[in-house]
Amino acid sequence: MTHRFLSHQGLASLVAQLLAANTRVIAPVRAKDDPQQIDYQPIHSFEEAAIGVRLPRRSLKEYFLPPTEVLLHYSQTKEGVEIREVSTAAPPQVILGATPCDVASLEVVDKVMGWDYRDELWFGRREATTIVSFLCSLADSTCFCTAVGLGPESFRGSDLLLVPVDGGYLANVVTSRGEALLHGFASEATDAAIAAAESSSRAARQKVDSNLEALPADFGGWLASNFDNPLWKTIALRCHGCGACAAVCPTCHCFDIVDEHDTADSGVRRRNWDSCQTGLFTLHASGHNPRQSQSERFRQRIQHKFSIYPSRFAEILCTGCGRCSRSCPGGMDLPKLLLELVTLSQAKPEVSGQ
Amino acid sequence: MTELQELARQLLTEKTVNVVIGYEEGPRGVRPAFITAPEQASSLVFNIHCVQNLAAYLNPRRKQVAQLGKAAIVVKGCDARAVAGMIREQQVERANVVIIALRCGGVLQNPGTASELTAETTSVRCAGCTVRDPKLFDYVLGELPPEPPVNTHRVEQIAALERMTSAERWNFWTAQLSRCVRCHACREACPMCFCVKCTAEKTQPQWIDPSSTPRANRAWQTMRVLHQAGRCVDCLECERACPEHIPLGLLARYVADAVERRFDYAASDDPSVAAPFGAYRPGDEEEFIR
């Protein structure tokens, strides 16, 4: 990885050039309904961007997997059924100022999107997107990126990672795409800038490090062999099963596919976000529901993220962003629950006998 | 040990109930607690951070809670209206729940935020509260604290909505509801949403498209708020649950005000008082039925 220096003016010019070329630029901005809050939104000028202010309320997910999207149009004619598929080509877009946890989640989800079937809509957007992430100094008590193998300085999934230094940013050039984006705007990085960036990366890491220790390597295995542990009966008592956690989660990617009629003989097939936290998710046509209560549904959430996905793709399906805890109306707290589970998994079995 | 902790301990020790649903300090402010052993009763708290309406946990569909057995529930006067609603609508048997009501001096808008009640931090639902001294209870605890500062934010929002033309109001709500991702978190967190099968999930016919489109979102939220007319207890759990931060409480309150004007009825903490949705009176206005 190479380092370059990008001045404040250089970044502003770079963004201005992108916008002038009609490239969509998505950045953290102050939320319309609450200026204290931050949302990722397309910007129309560099001044709109509010980078490094606060962790955005929602992840980047909606720019790769929208809450709803049309898969195909259908119409019934005398000759039969006509199907018109949507284009999977996406216009180029640049994401600016995203947090490392949000960016890393895209690579984590790539695994399932390219597994038994290559999801062309997902990868169409992935390939059309250049990602400029920022060193994250925004950690609060719900963050735990360092416990899941990431960190506030992680460049996983980024093309460029910017670290604020005197006069601008130290640009960590991760990919050739990132290098191309910088072309003409950056200059050589000084040793002092590199050292300053290293120091602020360490400080950012310290801010989140103590929230939760790295999950043990055998945690997924322990979860798998404790599927029937009685703890699941009580762990989710306060969970309403509302699924707000899944909506704000950068790695939750489940969707439902439905046909919706526009007229009696034409309509669209759409896919919509779905969540394993609702009863409908597993309801069979027979009326039987294998996950009867929230106990089983919450167990599924934990098992999928920390055992099933890791065993299949060698990835934890969580980047420690803490949004599920922040958005939960029932006060569920993932880092606290993980700590309880890890402690239980490491408890020595009681010695029986004499 | 506080009066509340002592009562919880006693109810559990005497096996009057199997669980006390109350509040405890959590990692980010006060959160719901499920106390099943007398020695855990000391973790119960009641203060201005006790924002949540715990009545939703009495919903028989909360099977993970129902399996614990008979419950006692800690309520504020406003939350007691939800318990009354559930009794009125035969979701909960009065004899099967022990209601521990706390006299209330107001709560915050969010459980994890400010440390004192001010005109900005107090919940908008506390403005004009008439049930600070609860009436539906088995036990009522505490002295009545002074009235909290009045947060006028929502009154102003409603006044602004009233001043709009109907076209402006339509555009306002269309814009707000266009953000809805149809996760239905509002419904799941709501103590008064307890239909076994929600209309939004009926597919034969599909009354409401499940996708997040302006038309379907409007249909969904309109249906929900109309079904809540005169039933909503204004606890704002829907709004707290909404991952898109749509002002669902404002929408519900707007409808509740209309019900009050039309039917002279506000969500009551007396289960024996019939709500407009389940009753007909010869004097009911009906000029809007055409």
Image (tube, helix red, strand yellow):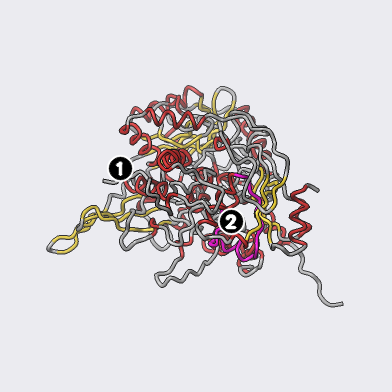
Image position, residue A205 (x, y; %): 65, 40
Pick out the residue farthest to the bottom.
Answer: A353
Q: Which mark is residue B57?
A: 2
Q: Which residues are magenta?
A: B56-77
Answer yes or no: is residue A310 visible. no
Tell me the SS state at disc 1.
loop
Residue appearing at x 77%, y 48% in the figure? B3
Subunit of mark 2? B
Q: Is A180 in front, or is A220?
A: A220
Q: Chain of mark 1?
A: B
For the residue labelled by badge 2, is the local secondary structure a helix, a strand or a loop?
helix
Return the x and y of residue B184 as percentages of the image width and height: 45, 51
Quarter of the figure with residue B14: bottom right
Residue A226 screen position, x and y as percent: 64, 68
Question: Image height check: is A292 above or below B126?
Answer: below
Q: Label 2: few (<14), some or many (≥20) within 10 Å?
A: many
Front position among marks 1 and 2: 1
Residue B172 as seen in the image, left or right of residue A29: left
Depth check: give the residue in front, A90 or B9: B9
Whether residue B276 is visible, yes or no, is yes
The crowd level at tag 1 (other Cα within 10 Å; few <14, some 14-19, many 20+) is few
Residue at 54% from the left image edge and 25% from the top image edge:
A168
Q: Residue at x 73, y 64 (%)?
A: B15
Q: What residue would you read off at disc 1?
A: B287
Going by the numbered disc 1, the residue's amino acid type is: Glu
